[in-house]
Each structure stands twice: as C-alpha cells, then as structure tokens.
Amino acid sequence: MTNGDKFMNKKTASLALLALLCVTTLFVFSQTSSQFPELDKNGKPLLPRPMPHLVYSPTDLAHSGVALPASVGGATPNTSIIRIGDATKMTVFASCTQNFDLVMTVYTADDQGQSNPNFIVYNSYIIATNMGSGAQQAFLASELAPTVTSGTLGAPVRLPQLAVSFFEKNDVATAGTCTDRVIIGY
C-alpha cells in the first residue's frame, strides 16, 4: 500500500465519521417533544405548517345542504369538531336559504395532547343573530373583535380556543338548508 492510498483511506474514513456525526446530531435535535402533536383534519401534524391557512370544506365539516327545521329556533346539527388550539384567526362561511343565527360550540379536553382526545362541550355562543339568507361570513381572531357581514354581532368570542364546531338556528318558521366552510389561519 502506498502513502497515497493510506492518505485516501484516512480521508474517506474522516469524511464518513463526519457524516455520521452530522446525522446523529440532526437526529438528536429533531427529538424536541414527547407530547403528541396537534393533528389537522387529515391526521397530519400541524407543525411545521406548509401553509399559514387550513381550509375545511363542507365535506370536511359534514355540513353541506344540511336541513334547517321549519320552526323559529330550530337548529341544524353541529359541524364536525375543528381543532384550533394554535389558530390566530378564523373565518366561517355560512350559507343558508333563509335568515339564521350562527352559533359556535366550544369544547375542552383533559387529554388534549393525545392524537384523538375526548372533547367535552364547554358552552355554545351566538356569534351573530339575524344573518341574511345567502352567503355570509363571520371572522374571529385572537387580537381583533369579531365581525360579521350581516346581522347583529352576538357574543364577543375570541381565539384561542381548543376546539369548536358550528350550527345555525332558524330565525323564521320556514324550512331551509345550510352549508358551511371554514378557513383557519396560524
């Protein structure tokens, strides 16, 4: 074996050792939490987020063309529960065939660090009353007061909340349907 071959073997061994140390260091620093991450609607961890917004369709919310009973105060069922623990802003797009009240249900969970916690209803808040038929919006945020595109603003609910769902209450004695969408910002 020549001196050049010995030098190349030492150089190759040094580079391999350096690469192994880098990989080990990256692996150690990537293990920052023993708690399960908060999951999005698709069951994927929310952090790091590829986009600053998460969009929930009517299908995601199980709230597309949902019947609104023909009685004053009759209500649609709740949308699916949305985990919004780290959210800073949220817009609810509600569209009904007649005037309605938009209501938000807030949830708690003792086991919130788990990937599938048991949510418990904390309270329901009327976000707005007498919202007009057709597409309407309600905006909720952490630092701004809520706003709505029509109707009268109800409870001044702000973020953060652990988890929420929505439903509509009928303002008139006419049957109709409602569809919801939600966009959440982080």
Image: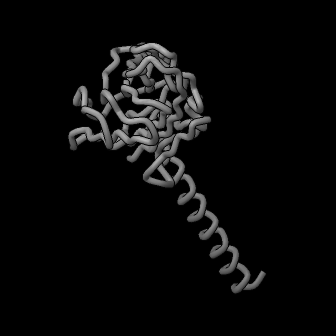
Residue found 69% across the figure and 85% down from its top: 3
Is 141 on the left or on the right of 48, as rendered?
Answer: left
Among the 4 quarters of the image, the one containing residue 170: top left
Q: Nearer the viewer, residue 53 or 58?
A: 58
Q: Is residue 9 above or below residue 99?
A: below
In the rendered image, is residue 32 in sight? no
- What residue is shown at x 46% (from left), y 40% (from top)? 134
Report the front residue among 43 and 63: 63
Residue 97, position in %: x, y? 50, 33
Q: How many numbered circles are shown?
A: 0
Horizontal and vertical percent position of residue 58: 57, 36
Asked whether 163 or 24 is in front, the reply is: 163
Tell me where residue 159 appears, x and y as whole percent: 29, 35
Up/down of 99 relative to 145, above or below:
above
Q: Is residue 6 above or below residue 27?
A: below
Quick check: 138 left or right of 68?
A: left
User: If the image is split into quadrants, where does the N terminus sit?
Assistant: bottom right
**Residue 106 visible to the viewer:** yes
Question: Image point 25% across, 38% down: which residue?
Answer: 146
Q: Quadrant of residue 143?
A: top left
Give the image's coloring scheme.
Answer: one colour
Position of residue 74 measured from the top left corner of the image (x, y, whole percent): 45, 14
What residue sits 56% from the left and 65% below the top?
18
